[in-house]
Structures are given as C-alpha cells and as structure tokens.
Amino acid sequence: MRIGEKMLLHNLSVSFFVTCCLALFSMPIIASETSEQIHSAVKNFVQNHEKTFLSKSGINADRASRIETKIGYVDPRLNLKPCQIPLEVNFRHSNKTTGRLTTKVSCNTGSLWSLYVPVTIDLYQRVAIANTPIPRGAHLQQHHLRLEEKNISMLYRGYYFNTKPLLGFVTTRAIKIDEVISPRNLTAPKVIYRNEEVTIIAKAGGLRVRASGVALSDGVLGETISVRNKNTKKIVEARVRGPGKVEIQI
C-alpha cells in the first residue's frame, strides 16, 4: 500500500473515531437537558396547585404549616429530545391530592413523547394528639390533648385540627401518648340512658306540646331512639336534643 493511501486511511479512521466520541458525549448532554426540563415542569406544576391541594384536604392555605414536595428520579440517560414548547403535566388518574402520586409529563410537538414521574406531596399541619396515655372509656378532657405538627398526608384514619370539639367524647380503645386522635377511636357521649325519664317535645309548625316518656335505649346527641309515652303508652321514634330531651315532628 502506498504511503498516500496509508495516510488517507489513517485520517479516515481518526475522523470516524472523533465522530463517534462526539456522538457519545452529545447524547447524554441532550438527555440531561431533557431530564432537567421534566423535573422543572413537574416542580412548577405542583407549586401552582398547592392551594388546590389544601382546599381539597379541607385546609385553608393560611392555616397550613408547610408543604414538602419530593419529585421522583428522572434518569438523565433517557433518550428524549428537549421539547420546543412547555411540557404538559397532569396527574395520572387519582382522587388523592397529597401523599404518593404519579404525574404524566408529555411533549406535544416534534417527537411527541410522554413518561410518568412519581411525586410525593407531604402536607404538615397541627393536629390533636394524646398528651397522656388515655384509657378506654375515658371522657376526653383538655389535659388529655395537645396540638402537634404531623404529616396529615399519611393519616389515613382521620384527624382533628382543634381539641375543643373533642371534649366530652368517649374513647373506644386505649390511646398511647403522642398518638394522633382519630374519629375511629372516639364515640359521642351518651346524653340519655335506657329507662330514663325524658321530656318528649312534639312540634307541629310553630306549636309545641310536651309530654313525659321513658327512653327504651341509650342515645347520643342527634340520634333517633324509641321512647314510650307514659300517658298513652304509645312508642314513638324521637331525636335526642339534649340531656333528658327528645323531639318528634307531627
């Protein structure tokens, strides 16, 4: 082989090698740009919807302690071209607004691609917890309770933002110190007991008639129980309105 041909072959080999190296280094750069674009789009989407998350969780935006968002890992080696228009981000079929969620990120121009990115939205708020160990059957008092910040996104059994409405409620099981107070652990206190004499208030428009009766079962506020009229011996269904008082509509 002639010297000129060898030099030409050498130059072609070097050129091919350089081209391959440039290709290898340029692909991760493009992919890295795309992963950053995806991460930024998801972050902006979540931030723009913070008030929606709060309202659907029953919290006023001014009352929320804080929101922490964790966006799942986006592999920078993804072979996706950067989108030339803003990425479209939506939640993937879910009724939840906090906790572990999935977003769908789409590029609706050019190469047309989409992928799913996990997101965790933790919402922190002060809720009622046990200030002391509380035995089963206890009537809650103020010293039993205190407020402490918790991640309510993980409190699937429910919680309370205030302690005052809980006073007088009865625990259905023992509650450990620092445990979040859940509706499942409480029952409304009985205000009427079986065989107790009660006042029956019969309402008809603006007219009210009172009669004496006997409760045939225990009752909590707002509950409907059976009551026997002491005079007529007739049994009626009446709504508990307070200690010793029931009401019927006629």
Image (cartoon, rainbow, N blue to C red):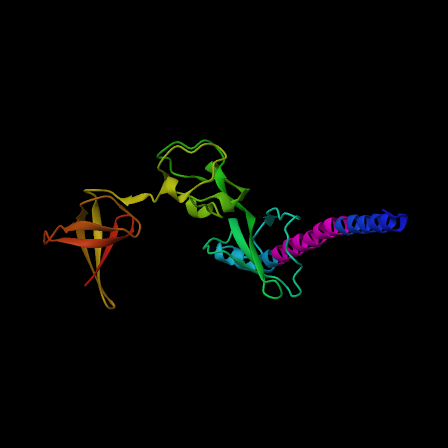
| Residue 49 visible in the current orientation | no
| Residue at the front extreme of this rendering | 1
- Please provide the residue range marked out in magenta: 21-44
Q: How many marks?
A: 0
Check residue 234 for magenta coloring: no
From the viewer's side, name the closer residue of 231 and 17.
17
Q: Quadrant of the C terminus?
A: bottom left
Q: Position of residue 113 (x, y in %)?
A: 58, 59
Residue in view at x 54 percent, y 54 percent: 103
Q: Position of residue 187 (x, y in %)?
A: 34, 43
Residue in view at x 56 percent, y 58 percent: 114
Q: Position of residue 43 (x, y in %)?
A: 63, 55
Residue in view at x 38 percent, y 39 percent: 185
Answer with left or right where residue 155 lies relative to residue 225.
right
| Residue 199 visible in the current orientation | yes
Q: Is residue 86 above or below residue 237?
A: below
Answer with left or right where residue 205 lies relative to residue 103.
left
Q: Main secondary structure of the magenta part?
A: helix
From the viewer's side, name the closer residue of 34 and 212.
34
Answer with left or right where residue 164 lies relative to residue 63.
left
Q: Position of residue 104 (x, y in %)?
A: 54, 56
